[in-house]
Image (cartoon, grey):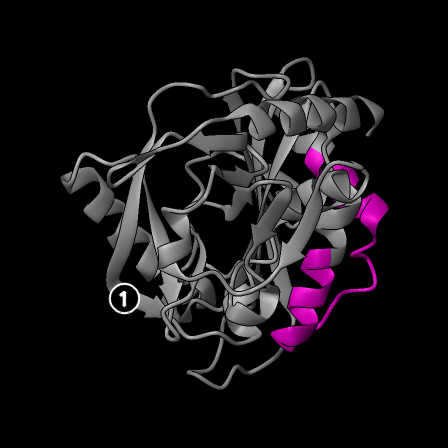
Amino acid sequence: MTNFNGNILEESTILSIENRGYNYGDALFETIKASFGNILFWEDHYFRLMASMRIMRMEIPMSFTMEYLEEQILSTLESNELLKSSARVKLIVHRNEGGLYTPNSNDVSFIISVKPIQDDFYLLQDSFYEVDLFKDHYVSPSLLSTLKTNNKALNVVGSIYVKENNLHNGIVLNTNKHVIEALNGNIFLVKGNIIKTSPISDGCLKGIMRKQIIDIIKSLPDYDIVEESISPFELQKADEIFITNVIVGIQPVTKYRKKVYLNEVSKNLLQKLNVKVRLN
């Protein structure tokens, strides 16, 4: 069952071929983890969505309160019998159809879909995980590149490249040849007591899990967080590399080219993250 503008519909409901998200990538989305009716980091998701809608010059309806959209997510979970388990929630906001590149109006509609997932808490993913640079295409850093729009051509092509080369993920560069993120999450490097991640100004996604991990690191006396540009050369100098997103939490990288990595800091941060989840 899918939620379309507050109406629970069969999943087979067909969208118009004039949908602006389909035609022009004129849509935003949030991927959210829900566990037993608890929408994790919902406030952060909500405010990122509102800020993104403003950047996209979408009209924010008066009804789009944090409470209203939370109710719609919970209603969708309930309709799919997922209130007593864990689920991946996708909330899409698209500008209403009409017009070509220039829309006829800035009014929006929303769609909420849900799928079950196994893990209620974030688990340590300590299996072999190899990455490499994806250099076929680059991200041009701007405010738009930090948004979760449904224009994800680079991520699709990059994921195919990863599959063809028997990798687990690809590392994305911007047009300045700086490391900015992985294909499905933000990236962190550990060197000694310094944990480094790419700044938003370099064009990386303004990730929700990225924010949680930065906040956790700031609370730890033994580590310092640095948001600075990362060169590909630094990848082989790092003690650890890990990737973050709201579904997996923290994914340690075990190998990049000939370099093999530890995961001690990842383990420590994962424990702190699960404490934060319980308090969420």
> Residue at (78%, 28%) from the top-left corner?
276
Q: Give left or right: position of 202 versus 231.
A: right
Taking depth in this image into account, of 264 and 78 the one nearest to the observer is 264
Q: Which quadrant is the N terminus positioned in?
A: top right
**Residue 51 is inside the magenta segment:** yes
Taking depth in this image into account, of 217 and 6 the one nearest to the observer is 217
Magenta residue span: 48-73
What secondary structure is found at the residue carrying circle 1? strand
**Principal secondary structure, stretch drawn in magenta:** helix
Query: Residue 183, can we see it?
Result: no
Name of the residue lying farthest toward the front:
192
The residue tagged 1 is 137
Report x, y in % for residue 8. 62, 36
- In the rendered structure, which amino acid carries the disc numbered 1? His
Report x, y in % for residue 96. 56, 68
> Residue at (52%, 21%) from the top-left corner?
116
Q: Give left or right: position of 97 versus 68.
A: left
